[in-house]
């Protein structure tokens, strides 16, 4: 997988123009979802570099990350005369960049695409690193390919369109990047208050956060080893997300990750000696900004089952990434049913 160019943009018009101009192409397509069409497209539609672009719009939210939406994108590309030399801009959150990246990677065996993430979650995670795909058969990201965008343009102008919940959701992935990098990064993140977001400061933190991910992806693009560090908090987080979905509760991905981080740091403290005071400092931050996930012990079996079905696992065991300290990463760790139940007890009691 080729290394992608990640631009921290201070002038979206210039960055887009340079990125589009850097790819020789015959036709330009712009993929949005219904929300980004309304909220974000007006911020770019007048730019000279976007003129002549053919629009493709899909339904918003993860429920639309489907084969049907993918077929719609392929159909518009085909009917709009796209060739192997066409270029697609994916303007939106993780759903748009994942599905759009997959559509572009497969149409005529692959056309170039540029990601312009519009949510904090997609800026610091989904749009960077070449994971593309759709949900299928009731499972998230079940079908997809690794294929990087030509360029990813990170422009924090879009963050001003987000509400607190969506900012907090993305920030959870930044906390994760802090935990797997350095004490300085982690401590700086804990000092930032998402509720009173200083956007200039947030922009700087986004740059540092993405650099952590880029560095890891560069080392292990296909997730054979160290890229699994990016799964910290996600084994439990995905189980919380799935349980909430089954119960008809809406939980944003980053909230589930933040709660998952608390659980997995506890397991890290027990198994790897992760320092208790850093555990409690992180717990306090998560409690203050994300609240807690409510469940009782009758749900433990179900959560355990959900963890064993996670696609990160092999043959029924539950795979975790754990930390011995901030930045001291231990991938491919397993935990027993008893350890997992103890971790869930700890989560509910703290
Ligand atoms: N979202 C984790 C990764 O890109 O590997």
Image (spheres, rainbow, N blue to C red):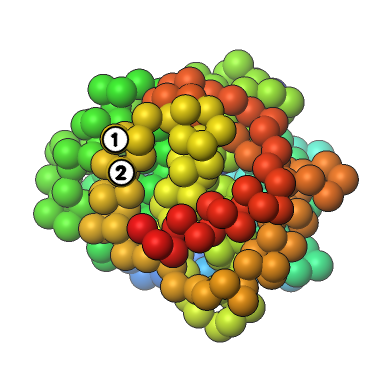
Q: CA distance from mark 2 to mark 1?
A: 5 Å
Vertical placement of residue 249 versus 98, above or below: below
Measuring from the top left, give residue 106's x and y in whole percent.
Answer: 77, 45
The residue lying at 49 percent from left, 50 percent from top is 263
Residue 47 visible here: no
Q: Left or right? Give the position of 42 relative to 69.
A: left
Viewer-side residue, 180 vs 213: 180
- Which of the 4 quarters of the picture holds residue 3? top right
Residue sitting at the far top: 219
Q: Which labelled disc corresponds to residue 38?
A: none
Query: Could you tell me which secondary element the residue under label 2 belongs to?
Result: helix
In the rendered structure, are the residues bearing label 2 and label 1 in contact, judged by CB atoms less than 8 Å apart?
Answer: yes
Viewer-side residue, 126 vs 101: 126
Measuring from the top left, give residue 199's x and y in whole percent.
Answer: 17, 45
Query: How many numbered marks does the figure carry?
Result: 2
Look at the numbered disc 2 and say if its residue's Cβ is closer than 8 Å to ligand 1: no
- Which of the 4 quarters of the picture holds residue 72? bottom right
Viewer-side residue, 348 vs 333: 348
Viewer-side residue, 183 vs 32: 183
The residue lying at 44 percent from left, 64 percent from top is 348
Rate crowding at label 1 as few (under 14), some (14 to 19) or many (20 or more) other CA atoms within 10 Å.
Answer: few
The residue lying at 30 percent from left, 43 percent from top is 280
Query: Could you tell me which secondary element the residue under label 1 belongs to?
Result: helix
- Which of the 4 quarters of the picture holds residue 181? top left
The residue lying at 43 percent from left, 38 percent from top is 176
Measuring from the top left, give residue 148's x and y in whole percent.
Answer: 62, 32
Residue 146 visible here: yes
Query: Mark 1 highlights which residue?
Result: 277
Query: Mark 2 highlights which residue?
Result: 280
Rate crowding at label 2 as few (under 14), some (14 to 19) or many (20 or more) other CA atoms within 10 Å.
Answer: some
Measuring from the top left, give residue 127's x and y in whole percent.
Answer: 51, 42
């Amino acid at each position: 997988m080729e290394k992608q160019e990640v631009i921290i943009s201070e002038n979206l018009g210039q960055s887009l123009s340079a990125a589009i101009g850097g790819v020789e192409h015959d036709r330009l397509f712009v993929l949005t979802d219904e929300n980004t069409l309304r909220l974000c497209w007006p911020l770019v539609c007048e730019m000279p570099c976007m003129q002549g672009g053919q629009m493709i719009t899909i339904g918003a939210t993860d429920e639309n990350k489907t084969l049907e939406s993918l077929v719609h994108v392929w159909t518009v590309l085909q009917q709009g005369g796209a060739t192997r030399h066409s270029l697609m801009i994916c303007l939106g959150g993780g759903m748009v960049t994942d599905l759009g990246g997959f559509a572009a990677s497969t149409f005529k065996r692959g056309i170039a695409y540029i990601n312009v993430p519009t949510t904090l979650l997609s800026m610091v995670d989904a749009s960077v690193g070449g994971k593309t795909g759709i949900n299928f058969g009731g499972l998230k990201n079940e079908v997809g390919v690794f294929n990087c965008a030509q360029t990813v343009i990170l422009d924090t102008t879009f963050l001003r369109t987000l509400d607190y919940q969506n900012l907090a959701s993305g920030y959870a992935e930044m906390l994760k990047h802090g935990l797997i990098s350095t004490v300085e990064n982690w401590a700086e993140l804990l000092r930032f208050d998402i509720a009173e977001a200083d956007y200039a400061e947030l922009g700087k933190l986004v740059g540092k956060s993405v650099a952590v991910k880029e560095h890891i992806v560069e080392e292990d693009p296909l997730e054979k080893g160290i890229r699994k560090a990016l799964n910290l908090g996600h084994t439990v987080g995905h189980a919380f997300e799935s349980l909430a979905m089954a119960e008809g509760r809406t939980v944003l991905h980053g909230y589930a990750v933040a709660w998952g981080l608390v659980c997995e740091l506890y397991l890290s403290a027990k198994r790897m000696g992760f320092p208790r005071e850093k555990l409690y400092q992180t717990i306090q931050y998560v409690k203050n900004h994300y609240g807690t996930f409510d469940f009782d012990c009758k749900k433990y079996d179900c959560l355990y089952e959900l963890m064993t079905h996670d696609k990160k696992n092999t043959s029924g065991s539950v795979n975790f990434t754990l930390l011995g300290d901030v930045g001291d990463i231990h991938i491919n760790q397993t935990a027993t049913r008893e350890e997992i139940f103890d971790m869930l007890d700890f989560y509910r009691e703290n």
